[in-house]
Image (cartoon, rainbow, N blue to C red):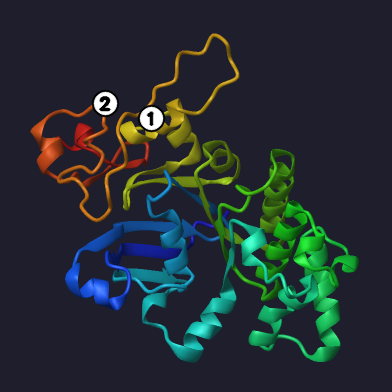
Amino acid sequence: MNDQVLLDVRNLKIYFPAGGDWFAQMFDRRKIKAVDEISFSISRGSTFGLVGESGSGKTTTGRVIARLIDPTSGHVTYNGKDLTGLRGKALKRMRRRIQMIFQDPSSSLNRRKTAGQIVSEPLRIHKLVDRKGLEARLIEVMELAGLSRRFLNRYPHEMSGGQRQRVGIARALAADPEFIICDEPVTALDVSIQAQILNLLMALQDELGLTYLFIAHDLSVVKHVSNNVAVMYLGKIVEIADTHTLFFDPKHPYTRALLAAVPKPDPKAKERKILHGEVPSPIAPPSGCRFHPRCPEMIGEVCRKKEPGEVTLSDGARVSCHLYSS
């Protein structure tokens, strides 16, 4: 694995209007703080896991990196170039290098098009091959994704969930990218198929030198594929560490709670700890540490009133918690 940083995210904020249409926004000036000043970097050739509960801001972060939505503020630097300032042809050229695999292949694939038409779309948009070379490239990327040429003329409804996701992977590979955002790529699949897709993604990474941002809520999946992991809660990153450190010596109370909630096939295992309360609204997040209303290790007024800064510990883990900064 190369330690060179391929993607760097600094102080990223993504706010949305709380009101629906423009008329509602006139009366409701509040903002949904989907992502609130997060920073991380991803080394070339590695897999960076991003985990957290639903609504924590994981997918929104991935969509901003892919420039499907614009950030409110902050910077996303890819291979030394600031993506947030790119427009027009420059953005189109950069998008060829960054692709995305979506969570649900049933909704992310155009049901009116065949697999061949779906996979050829990035090739046509970026004008990467001529008509003579199109079929050969389609067959090549379909085979990379584990599908034979006979699937080129099939529609999504004629394929299983795993086969549809392989088409989504082939589409992401077609433009020969360096960086792929995997947005919960196995969540919608049967358990028996999930391992096949994960093994395929890891084999492709070794063969093609790919770099992944792997977004998931399944901790066992993240543990299996990631080199480093960031844990998000209510728009904030609360802990970043290498995979071994995070899973065997978690620092933040939220990370410990997530890991404790994972079912263990051991009749002698201790009863799982369950977090009490609901995730607060991102429109009006709690003051101080955002996790303090649910935190079993809250240490007093400092947690309620002061937002914790990030602290780097001796093992390299970075954690935002007053247990380490007080």
Give the mark, 1 or 2, whose residue is nearer the N terminus: 1
The x and y percentages for residue 195 are 71, 42
Disc 1 residue type (three-letter): Ala
Q: Quadrant of residue 325?
A: top left
**Apparent side of residue 303 relative to residue 278 in the rendered image (left or right):** left
* Residue at image mark 1: 257
Q: Are marks 1 and 2 in contact (CB under 8 Å)?
A: yes
**Apparent side of residue 29 relative to residue 108 in the rendered image (left or right):** left
Under circle 2, the secondary element is loop
Disc 2 residue type (three-letter): Pro
Is 86 rendered above or below residue 62? below
**Apparent side of residue 69 relative to residue 47 in the rendered image (left or right):** left
Under circle 1, the secondary element is helix
Who is closer to the viewer here, 323 or 36? 36
Q: Residues within 10 Å of mark 2 (few under 14, many from 20)?
A: few
* Residue at image mark 2: 296
Report the Cα–Cα distance between label 1 and label 2: 9 Å
Who is closer to the viewer here, 75 or 272? 272
The x and y percentages for residue 144 are 78, 62
Q: Residues within 10 Å of mark 1 (few under 14, many from 20)?
A: some
- Quadrant showing the C terminus: top left
Q: Which residue is located at x 85 percent, y 66 percent?
A: 151
Q: Quadrant of residue 126?
A: bottom right
**Apparent side of residue 151 relative to residue 63 in the rendered image (left or right):** right
Q: Which residue is located at x 74 percent, y 64 percent?
A: 167
Q: Which residue is located at x 55 percent, y 52 percent?
A: 47
